[in-house]
Image: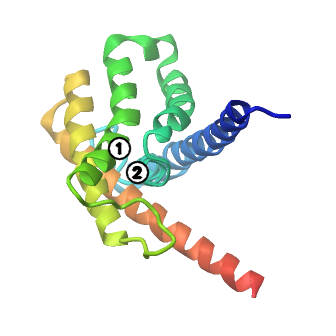
């Protein structure tokens, strides 16, 4: 007989694989497809920040759906992305702080909201509040932008670029998912 702890660990492993792959996929879509287009459209934009950062949407939706489990499910993908970008420099204190911010802030924000009486977790008896998710995503973006850019010692213009990229990344990821789920619903009927 399989022990409940083993089943829970297997479920967490599956969740981690799905969420981390989604994060990595969103990262590559952002930096291999969208960023080259951004650089063509805005050649004078000096910041290395993406104005359409899809991984933020993955972080927000993972935290909304999984709560604190999202920390463990996001961590492998976030670490791999940092290693891809910075090599062994991903383990510098500023980057480790940025990794911690990326995985902890979204779950902390949803938990704080729940403690304040506004539980946004998915439930069978209520429809998701999409506007609330975008609002929480904006708050998460502000916090992660401030904390990450502070850790990196970035210029103030980068704070705004991160905020814009996070907001539009979440919005467009939600829009893409809406169309995918609508297509899947129509394909089943």
Is residue 91 at all visible to an observer of this figure?
Answer: yes
Q: Which disc number belongs to residue 60? A: 2
SS state under label 2: helix
Outermost residue to the left: 156
Residue 132 locus on image (x, y percent): 29, 66
Reading the chain from its start, which is encountered first: label 1 or label 2? Answer: 2
**Residue at image location 46% in from the left, 63% down from the top:** 122
Is residue 163 at all visible to an observer of this figure?
Answer: no
**Badge 1 density bin: few <14, some 14–19, many ≥20, Cα 10 Å:** many
Residue 63 locus on image (x, y percent): 43, 48
The C terminus, quarter of image: bottom right
> Is residue 16 positioned above or below 84 on the image?
below
**Badge 2 density bin: few <14, some 14–19, many ≥20, Cα 10 Å:** many
SS state under label 1: helix
Is 151 in front, or is 154?
151
Is 161 in front, or is 17?
17
Is 80 in front, or is 105?
105
Q: Specify whether 124 is left or right of 164.
A: right
**Residue at image location 69% in from the left, 76% down from the top:** 184
Q: Which disc number belongs to residue 106? A: 1
* Cα–Cα span, label 1 and label 2: 6 Å
Residue 37 locus on image (x, y percent): 46, 54
> Is residue 59 positioned above or below 128 on the image?
above
Outermost residue to the front: 1
Q: Which disc number belongs to residue 182? A: none
Residue 127 locus on image (x, y percent): 43, 76
Give yes or no for contact between labels 1 and 2 (Cβ–Cβ under 8 Å).
Answer: yes
């Amino acid at each position: 007989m399989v022990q409940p702890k083993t089943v829970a660990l297997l479920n967490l492993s599956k969740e981690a694989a799905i969420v981390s792959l989604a994060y990595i996929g969103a990262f590559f879509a952002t930096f291999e497809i969208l960023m080259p287009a951004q650089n063509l459209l805005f050649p004078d934009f000096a910041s290395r920040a993406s104005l359409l950062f899809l991984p933020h949407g993955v972080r927000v939706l993972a935290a909304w759906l999984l709560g604190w489990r999202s920390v463990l499910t996001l961590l492998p993908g976030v670490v791999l992305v940092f290693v891809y970008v910075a090599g062994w420099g991903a383990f510098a204190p500023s980057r480790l702080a940025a990794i911690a911010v990326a995985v902890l802030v979204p779950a902390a924000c949803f938990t704080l909201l729940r403690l304040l009486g506004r539980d946004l977790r998915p439930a069978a008896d209520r429809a998701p509040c999409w506007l609330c998710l975008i609002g929480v995503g904006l708050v998460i973006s502000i916090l992660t932008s401030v904390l990450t850019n502070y850790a990196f010692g970035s210029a103030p213009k980068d704070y705004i670029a991160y905020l814009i990229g996070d907001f539009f990344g979440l919005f467009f990821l939600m829009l893409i998912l809406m169309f995918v789920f609508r297509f899947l619903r129509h394909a089943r009927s």
